[in-house]
Amino acid sequence: MVTITDIARALGITPSTVSRALAGSPRVKEKTRIAVERKALEMGYERNVVAANLRKGQSHIVGIIVPRIHREFFSNIIGGAESVLNQAGYNVLICQTMESKDSEIKALKTLRNYRVAAVLISHAIGSTDSRDIKEIIGKDIPIIQFDRVYPDLPGAKVVGANCDGAYFATKHLIQQGYKRIGTLAGYMSSLAFVERLAGYRLALESAGLPYDNSLVFYDTLVRDQGYEAAKKALASGCDALFSAGAFSALGAVDYLKEAGVRIPEDFGIVCTSNEGFTSLMTPSLSTLEQHPFEMGQAAAKAFLENRADTQVIPMELHIRQSSQRIQQEEFSCNHLLNNNQWQK
């Protein structure tokens, strides 16, 4: 790479003069500044942004940490955040953890070393508390959490209405005539999944149906886990599942098809996260839309506006083939109330 020293040597001036000229300092004569800029362009000089950030102790870069970039939910959050941040003059540095605590710690340390202006983060399943974040980032870099959050970590939070969404999704299954409804509950190390389980349970109890812990299938997030859980669910007499994630629901459908179970005639499924494949598969999956693009925009604005509150993004139920045995719905999920837990 061409350096400031290379330009200075070519022009017979000092590196400090070149540095001031490229920074537009009034201490440099106009003739010298033009000569430096021309020589820098001729030699292909590119400013070392990282080094400049280290000198200043700050930057116009915002770090975004997500569990999996290739999930449509997280990629849309990144898109929403970037649309706001770019307009405000910030660039984005993206890290993915692949649900690993160690990778999350490494990403946090990398972003700290880059002197980022802020970190937007959704935690990995392998990360179980906020201690590492507090130790690594400290108080100098704002933290904005989204989707998967730690309530005890100071700063802004942007979350989905998880409890309400799960309640209405389960209620929909009940209204479609399903009687023994289980759940692919996800991981209880994440508050988002805890809240979805609470909403599922509340819907059953409100309808006078028993809550049976043997029908709660934990640690279900990816396709293979959903496939194995569906085996157990069918063997336990389940006739429907509310899935806390879309990929575990996809695995459940894989197994049910192999077992010759008719969906939705004999078995119904609704899942959280309106991933693109959910509307294209057969049968199409009923989903809870989490509005990730808007979630990303809200997280970015929370940083720019220096907010420290919690914002709740309502969910919307998309009813498709996997759960609709009765054609006429008696309720709409378009008017979900915000999760009361976050209003306390």
Image (cartoon, rainbow, N blue to C red):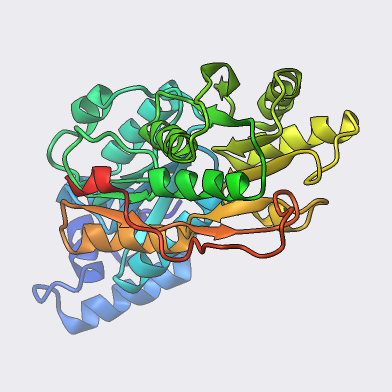
Image point (21%, 68%), residue name = 23
Q: Position of residue 276 (x, y in %)?
A: 67, 56
Near-viewer residue (57 or 65): 65
Taking the view exactly as shown, the residue that stands out farthest to the bottom is 30
From this view, report whether residue 250 is shown above or below residue 330: above
Image point (52%, 18%), residue name = 213
From this view, report whether residue 156 is shown above or below residue 88: above
Near-viewer residue (281 or 157): 281
Image point (67%, 38%), residue name = 249
Q: Position of residue 173 (x, y in %)?
A: 61, 45
Q: Is residue 283 left or right of residue 292?
A: right
Q: Is residue 179 left or right of residue 48?
A: right
Image point (25%, 42%), residue name = 341
Q: In the figure, residue 31 lies in which quadrant?
A: bottom left
Q: Is residue 135 left or right of residue 181?
A: left
Taking the view exactly as shown, the residue that stands out farthest to the left is 27
Q: In the figure, residue 265 lies in which quadrant?
A: top right
Q: Position of residue 107 (x, y in %)?
A: 39, 34
Q: Tell me if I can see residue 70 in this picture.
A: no
Near-viewer residue (261 or 132): 261
Q: Position of residue 344 (x, y in %)?
A: 16, 44
The mark tally for this picture is 0
